Image: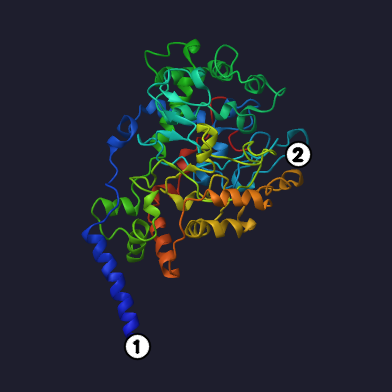
Amino acid sequence: MITKTQCITLTVLSWLTSLTVLAAGFPGPDPVTDSQFYDNGSPLPAKVQLGKQLFFDKILSGNENISCATCHHPMAGTGDGLSLPVGEGSRGLGVTRNTGSGDHAIHERVPRNAPPVFNLGAREFTRMFFDGRVEENALAPSGFDSPAGEDLPDGLDNPLAVQAMFPITSATEMAGQSGENPQADAAAIGQLAGIGGVWDLVAQKLQGIDVYVDMFMAAYPGEVLSAEDITYVHAANAIAAFEAREWRFDNSPFDQYLRGDKNAISAQARIGMNIFYGKGGCGDCHSGAFQTDHDFHAIAMPQIGPGKGDDPDGHGDFGRERVTGDSGDRFRFRTPTLRNVVLSAPYGHAGAYNTLEAVVRHKLDSVNALYEYDREQAVLPSRPDLDALDFVVMDDMNRLADIAAANELDPVWLKEKDIQALLAFLHSLTDQKALDMRGDVPESVPSGLPIWD
C-alpha cells in the first residue's frame, strides 16, 4: 500500500521526469527570425505610417462611420472582444458597441468572429479568413485565389494585403446597405473592380485628401507621382505593412525559452508545454513557429449567430466547403495561431467561447462540449430581433448531430492539474509588448473623421 508521503514523492518525481524529457528533446519549433517575415520584418516606415492612418480612418467605409480598427482594435487584442462583430450602422468600441436602432440599426451581426491580427506578416500565413478563401496561388492571374476571382487587381504584396481588399466590400462590415451610398450600391451588385467599382470609389475619396496624397507619394516613391496614381491596391498594401510591422509579436516567454533562456517560463508552464506537444495532442494541429498548421479541421465548434447562408434557412456555416465545394470539408475551419491567445477572446469561428479555459475544455471532449454548450459564453450585444436568430442551429438537434459527425478530435482525458498546466503554457505565449498597444492608435486621421465614436 502506497502511503500519502510516497504518493506525493511519486508525483514530484513524475513532474521532474517530464521536465528532464523536455530538456533532453523538446519537440517544438525553432525560434522565430526576421527572415520569416515579409521585408525581413522592416517594411518602409512611410508605408507603415500610411497604413496606420488608413486602418483607423472611417473614410474607407461607405457611410464613413466604421474603420478597420473598429473590429480589430489594439485596445481589444486586435479583435473587438465580441463573439460576433457589430459592424456597419453601430457606435461604440469593443464590448460597449451596440446594435444601433431605427434607421441606423445594424442589418445583422457579422457572421464570423473578428480574429486577431498577430504575426500575419509572417510568410507562412499564405491563407486568410476562417475558410481560407484568400490564398496564394501562383497560377492565378493576380497570384492569389480570392472571392474576387479574376477581378482581383495585380500588385498586391501578400495574402495579408489581399485580405485588406474585402471588408470595404461587405454590406454588413463596412460598405453599408444598398441605397445608402455609392460604395454600398456597387458592392450590392458585385462591382468591385473597374471604374465605379468599390475599390475605385474608395481610391477616389483618398485622392481628394491632400494629406493622404502626400503620404501615398512618400510611401510609393516613383510609383505614385500624383493623386490620380493612387489605387486601393496601394492602400491595401500599406494596411498590410502596418499590421505586419506593428503587430509582430515574437518575444513571449516561450520565444525566450526557444532562444535558450530555460528559466523564461515557469515549471508549471514547462509541464503544460510537454502536455501540449505530447499527450494533449494540441501540437498536432497547433504546430510550427506560430502554433498553427494552416490547415482546416472540424472540431465540433458551436455555431451561433446569423450564419453564412448555408442550410435551407441560411443560419449554417459550412466553413472550408464554401471555398472548395467539397462536402468533406464541411464544418472545417482554419487552425488559428495561438500567439497572444490569452488576449484574443472570444474563441472559435463564431466566437462561441468567451474564456480560454472553456475552449481548451471543448477541445478535450469536443462532441460532448458541443451538446452541453453554455450559452452564457456568448458575448453578443442584445437586440430582440437578432437574439431570436443567434441560437437557431444550437436549438436544432439534427444540425448538431451533423456538426458532431464531422468532428475529427478524439477525446483526451487530462487531470485537472494537467489542464491548469496547459493553460499556464498558453499564457507563456503572450508577448509582454502586446499588453499595452495604446501607442498604435493615432490621435487623428487625415480625413478629419472621428476615431472613437
The image shows residue 373, relative to residue 66, as above or below, that is below
Name the side, left or right, on which 325 lies relative to 216: right
Alpha-carbon distance for marks 2 and 1? 66 Å
Q: Secondary structure at mark 1?
A: loop
Q: Which residue is mark 2?
A: 101
Taking the image as drawn, is residue 394 in sight?
no
Q: Secondary structure at mark 2?
A: loop
Instruction: Tell me the quarter of the picture where residue 234 sits.
Output: top left
Name the side, left or right, on which 109 lies relative to 233: right
Q: Which residue is mark 1?
A: 3
User: Who is closer to the viewer here, 394 or 410?
Assistant: 410
The image shows residue 299, relative to residue 33, as above or below, that is below
Q: What residue is rendered at 66% in x and 41% in y?
A: 315
User: Who is closer to the viewer here, 131 or 119?
Assistant: 131
- What is the three-letter code of the residue carrying label 1? Thr
Taking the image as drawn, is residue 163 in sight?
yes
Name the side, left or right, on which 45 lies relative to 173: left
* Mark toward the start of the polypeptide (2 vs 1): 1
Q: What residue is rendered at 53% in x and 36% in y?
A: 321
Q: Residue 11: where, in percent of width, then height?
A: 33, 76
